[in-house]
Image (cartoon, helix red, strand yellow):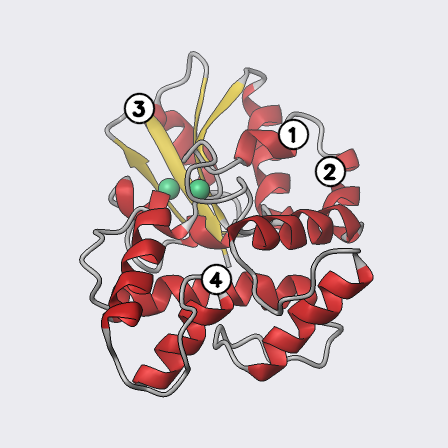
């Protein structure tokens, strides 16, 4: 990522207020540090690969929430995304800045989540689980709880497992945001970040018994038992 692009990332998210000129000075370092601190990274002020990935994750979510289908979801801040933010602010009675600082960002994401009817309808057909059980366990520190929506196919499989054992299933980890995933030692490519993985246990059943059954489900891409106490399973 070029210095100019880094400044764009920081500017769009409300951390950098200087000129976007690619000259990396104290303002850029300070802005980087603030972003890092807000999202639970080491606040060293160095805009490296981790910070770049974090900023791209945040901006991708923003773009997904703003797009009418024409904007590229590339996680890269620029005039197009800023204009979309400004238009959103105008149509929602907000001060028009074109900048998505933390409170603006949360507002945009919350409105988009409410407006997305397809994301929740299928929950009505799920017998044993509710969406809230899959909320990111960072407790709202680094995300709004749903940086990704739980995948329908995954939850349908969970329902089937729960039905088969006829005992309560407890979700121990559902969707994870970038920071929470890192904090719990999840691999970078973890499917938890996509809403496509869950960890759970079934009351009164051993992890190996649950695992044996999950392995028979063709829709499950990958599954394993963790510490003999709970089972991870994910879908494509
Ligand atoms: Zn989180
Ligand atoms: Zn897992």
Tell me residue 172's x, y (percent). 42, 28
Ligand 1 quarter of the rendering? top left
Give the residue displayed 42% in from the left and 37% down from the top: 141
**Structural distance between the alpha carbons of marks 3 and 1:** 22 Å
Q: Are marks 3 and 2 in contact (CB under 8 Å)?
A: no
Tell me residue 226's x, y (percent). 28, 33
Numbered badge on residue 130: 1
**Is residue 39 something that shows in the picture?**
no
Q: Are marks 1 and 2 in contact (CB under 8 Å)?
A: yes
Relative depth, front residue between 119 and 208: 119
- Mark closer to the chain start, 3 or 2: 2
Give the residue displayed 37% in from the left and 54% down from the top: 190
Quadrant of residue 1 in the image? bottom left
**Structural distance between the alpha carbons of marks 4 and 3:** 43 Å
**Structural distance between the alpha carbons of marks 4 and 1:** 34 Å
- Mark closer to the chain start, 1 or 2: 2
**Is residue 99 something that shows in the picture?**
yes
| Some atom of ligand 1 lies within 8 Å of the CB belonging to the residue at label 4 | no
Q: Is residue 156 left or right of residue 209?
A: right
Could you say whether the residue bearing mark 3 is in a helix, strand or loop?
A: loop
Q: Which residue is denoted by mark 4 in the rendering?
A: 14
| Some atom of ligand 2 lies within 8 Å of the CB belonging to the residue at label 3 | no
Numbered badge on residue 123: 2
Q: Which residue is denoted by mark 3 in the rendering?
A: 229
Quadrant of residue 2 in the image? bottom left
| Some atom of ligand 1 lies within 8 Å of the CB belonging to the residue at label 2 | no
**Structural distance between the alpha carbons of marks 1 and 2:** 7 Å
- Mark closer to the chain start, 4 or 2: 4
Q: Is residue 115 left or right of residue 185?
A: right
Relative depth, front residue between 109 and 177: 109
């Amino acid at each position: 990522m070029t210095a100019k692009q880094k400044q764009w990332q920081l500017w769009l998210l409300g951390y950098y207020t200087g000129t976007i000129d690619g000259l990396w000075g104290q303002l850029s370092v300070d802005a980087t540090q603030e972003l890092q601190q807000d999202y639970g990274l080491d606040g060293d002020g160095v805009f490296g690969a981790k910070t770049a990935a974090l900023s791209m994750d945040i901006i991708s979510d923003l773009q997904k929430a703003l797009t009418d289908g024409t904007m590229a979801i590339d996680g890269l801040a620029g005039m197009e995304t800023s204009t979309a933010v400004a238009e959103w602010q105008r149509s929602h009675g907000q001060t028009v800045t074109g900048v998505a600082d933390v409170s603006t960002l949360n507002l945009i994401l919350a409105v988009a989540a409410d407006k997305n009817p397809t994301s929740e309808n299928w929950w009505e057909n799920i017998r044993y689980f509710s969406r809230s059980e899959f909320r990111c366990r960072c407790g709202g520190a680094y995300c709004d709880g749903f940086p990704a929506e739980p995948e329908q196919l995954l939850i349908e499989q969970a329902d089937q497992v729960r039905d088969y054992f006829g005992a309560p299933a407890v979700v121990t980890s559902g969707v994870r945001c970038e920071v929470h995933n890192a904090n719990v030692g999840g691999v970078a490519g973890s499917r938890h970040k996509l809403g496509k993985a869950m960890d759970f246990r079934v009351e009164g059943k051993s992890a190996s018994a649950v695992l044996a059954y999950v392995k028979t489900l063709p829709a499950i891409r990958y599954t394993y038992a963790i510490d003999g106490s709970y089972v991870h399973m994910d879908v494509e």
